[in-house]
Image: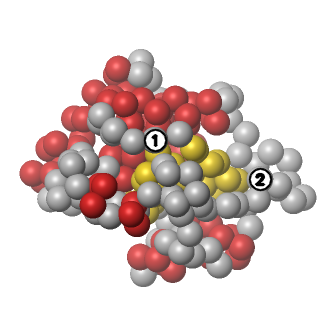
Amino acid sequence: MTIEIGLDIDADKIAGLDLNADIDLNIDKEIENQKQPFAFDFDYESVANEVINFVIDKEGFPYEAEVNLLLTDDDGIQKINAQFRQMYCVTDVLSFPMIDYDAPGDFSRLEESEDYFNPDTGEAALGDIVLNVDRVRKQAACFGHSELREFAFLIVHSMLHLFGYDHMEQKDADIMEPLQEKILEELNILR
């Protein structure tokens, strides 16, 4: 399984990305003229790996997989949101699935399309997650839980989107939202 974690604080640089053009989202991990702008009191790379792997296993995904995770700030996510969704607002997380599903978590037809697999690695390209660190901090404080819990929640939420789940209609939210909470409980990442 491949998980690439990129850090970027230059919002103009982020806005130039074409998230759908390449299976691998390669972002510089070098942060210029800043001192650990995304520092957490937990090992975010380990948490991201643990949560992503757990969701993949929980959903029974039958292939090796690639997931790209980009950590950014309010300005960066606003520019990405505007560029790719024509929504000119800040949000907490964006999900860019690379696979179309007939139903959430239905992996039965993936092998019918080579487009879902990275030709270099053979791994299924699940998609990209763009996570707003500023919102992780704000929402954790607002909801009265740890930044670790908020960070993990947003990754679980986004991973479920990468597997075809949604919450725009109540009937879909009634499936996705309890699943998010169950996954976090099983990970023992509680409020």
Q: CA distance from mark 1 to mark 2?
A: 24 Å
Residue 61 x/y as whole percent: 33, 39
Seen from the viewer's position, the closer of residues 49 and 150 is: 49
- Whole-percent x, y for residue 15 in the image: 62, 76
Q: Is residue 51 above or below residue 104?
A: above
**In terms of secondary structure, where does tag 2 sit?**
loop
Give the position of the C terminus as an image quadrant.
top left
Residue sticking out furthest to the left: 171
Q: Amino acid at mark 2?
A: Lys
Q: Residue at x 56, y 51 (%)?
A: 121
Q: Residue at x 27, y 61 (%)?
A: 112
The amino acid beneath tag 1 is: Glu
* Mark 1 / mark 2, whichever is N-terminal: 2
Residue that badge 1 annotates: 64
Q: Which mark is residue 29?
A: 2
One can see residue 160 in this view: yes
